[in-house]
Amino acid sequence: MRILFAILACVAGLTVAHPAAAADHAPWDTLLSRYVRESADGVNRVDYAAWKASAPDRAALTAYVAALQGERPSALPRADAFAYWANLYNAVTVEVILARYPVRSIRDIRSEGGGLKGLIGPWQTKRVTVEGKRLSLDEIENAVMRPTFADPRVHYALNCASIGCPNLRTRAFRGATLEADLDAAARAYIGHPRGVQVTPQGLRLSTIYKWYAGDFGDAAALRAHLARYAPPALAAQIRASTRVAGYGYDWSLNGTERQ
């Protein structure tokens, strides 16, 4: 496994001899601005029905994903490589939903040849080829981004087409603004009830913080992380809390039909 991580870390952009120009994410900007809706309740939703009905925009998404597969993220600076992988993951996830829409949840879509793990969700199917490596969504997240960038904000950048997930942005990630954009994504999620709730019994958190506990550290480190990005009143409550009362996650599709 360490060998696999080392290979994929190289692909992801850790070893950069001659930085290349960042990928063109303008087509992704256009599609996101057209179909992602910012809602009053703080959850961004995607108009999958309209997107699926537009053959030109489905083709534009396919072309964007194909163009990314022709790039060399190993030749990108670290921030541009992070943006590349996050945009690729999110674009492919939208492709998966559009191919099966209407669907109630991404977990209703099975992986191809995924064994028991493939019974729930599409994450095991090999979907893209990057620098000769055939990768699934699961591998992009867990074998490339998490070990390569070692940044818990990875979890605020990736969208799994679910209400419980951090928002799909209305613009692509880019290396030049990555730090500010990741901080904003963390603040938006932690400051929303689907990320953190304070109850008389203790904190009720998104299950993200349970699934990926190792990325956030021990209980004290997690509270510090949450407080760092929470609005002031919530941050004070987080610091004062001594226990986690439970976890939750809404796997319902993040489509506009849920508004």
Image (cartoon, grey):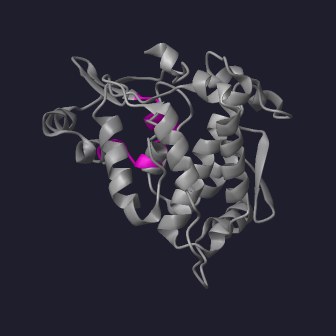
Q: Is residue 246 left or right of residue 11?
A: left
Task: Kindly report the secondary structure that dominates the magenta region of the rendered protein.
Answer: helix
Magenta region, residue range: 206-220
Q: Check if residue 216 falls in the magenta segment.
A: yes
- Find residue 188 and report its image quarter: top left
- Residue 157, position as x, y percentages in the image: 47, 46
Q: Is residue 238 left or right of residue 98?
A: left
Q: Going 51% across and 66% down the picture, which residue do you hit?
A: 80
Q: Going 45% across and 47% down the picture, which residue do you hit?
A: 171
Confirm whether residue 92 shows in the render.
yes
- Residue 135, position as x, y percentages in the image: 75, 51
Q: Quadrant of the C terminus?
A: top left
- Of 193 and 40, which appears nearest the observer? 40
- Residue 146, position as x, y percentages in the image: 55, 54
Above or below, 220 relative to 25: above
- Of 210 and 91, which appears nearest the observer? 91
Above or below, 229 relative to 52: below
Q: Check if residue 129 falls in the magenta segment.
A: no
